[in-house]
Amino acid sequence: MKQEHKMANWLFEHLAVDAAVAGDILEEYERRRSRIWFAKQVMVAVCASVWNPVRDDKLIVLRAMFIGWGAVSAWSLLIGYPWQLLRSWPPGPSLAPAKGFLTLLFLLATNAAIAWVLARIEHTRRAITLLAFLIFQSACYVYATYEEGRRLMVDSID
Amino acid sequence: MLAVIRLGEGAYGVPVYREIEEQTGRGPAFGTVYATLDRLERKGLVRSDLGDPTPERGGRAKRYFRATAKGLRAVRQARHVLTKLWRGLPELEGGIA
């Protein structure tokens, strides 16, 4: 199997691209179409498979955000406080970069776990649910980072 | 819709794509072809059936489309409206040039 076939098949399967569309693209690509043509077709098929469920059911994005937010809140209540305690030990600034790295790992693991739960709950519309969750989470982190930065700037001026 | 009617029994994604490419000189994306056909199916203008899976398609089945009676009526109606709109346009008479 060609390398691009493997990649495309992976995308088709994981982003729930309609089997008929995927089959048509592979069949037509065998008819001496270029790699650029193939890449364009795969991209449009993937975008359509993400967008079409939103067009059919507008509430899916809100549901994904709500479930994601609920999962994050529950996770924070269960794990967040013990993690804060763990982070503050051992005291002292010498381990700050290591702590930062561990925090980043923890955040990534947390979000991966929540994304996995979301994908299991909304398995028929996995791609759009995960995309909505990812955008929502990124927006939350950007806002939180901006607020923290602004606070630090104001404090440094005072 | 016209490509599906022209192709008759063998109207699945690839022939529809080739028909559009041949007639217009530009190939659309399969994703947009299927989005359009799905919309037509929801409106009851076409219906689709799955064929057998084939190895060159990675074991995936073809989805055959056929125009329904409602779809054929809609196309006739659209042609009628277009013909009426084209009538009485002196600037556009006398060939392409």
Image (spheres, coloured by chain):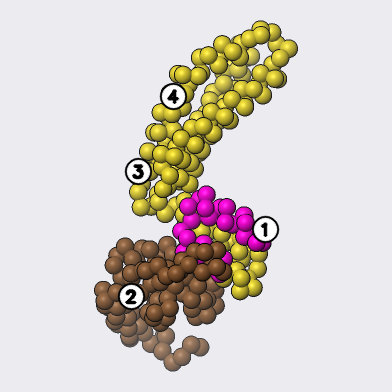
Q: Which portion, as a residue range, is magenta? A: A1-27
Is A123 within the magenta? Answer: no
User: Where does residue B23 sit, x and y in percent of width and height?
Assistant: 49, 80
What shade does chain B have?
brown
User: Which numbered mark, 4 or 3, is in the foreground of this view?
Assistant: 4
Label 2 sits on what residue type?
Ala
Q: What residue is disc 4 on?
A: A73
CA gap, disc 4 and disc 3 = 21 Å
Q: What residue is disc 1 on?
A: A3
Label 1 sits on what residue type?
Gln
In which chain is the residue bearing label 2? B
Q: Where residue A59 is drawn, which disc sits there?
A: 3
Q: Name the dominant secondary structure of the magenta segment.
A: helix
CA gap, disc 1 and disc 2 = 38 Å
Q: Which chain is yellow?
A: A
Q: Is residue A28 left or right of residue B34?
A: right
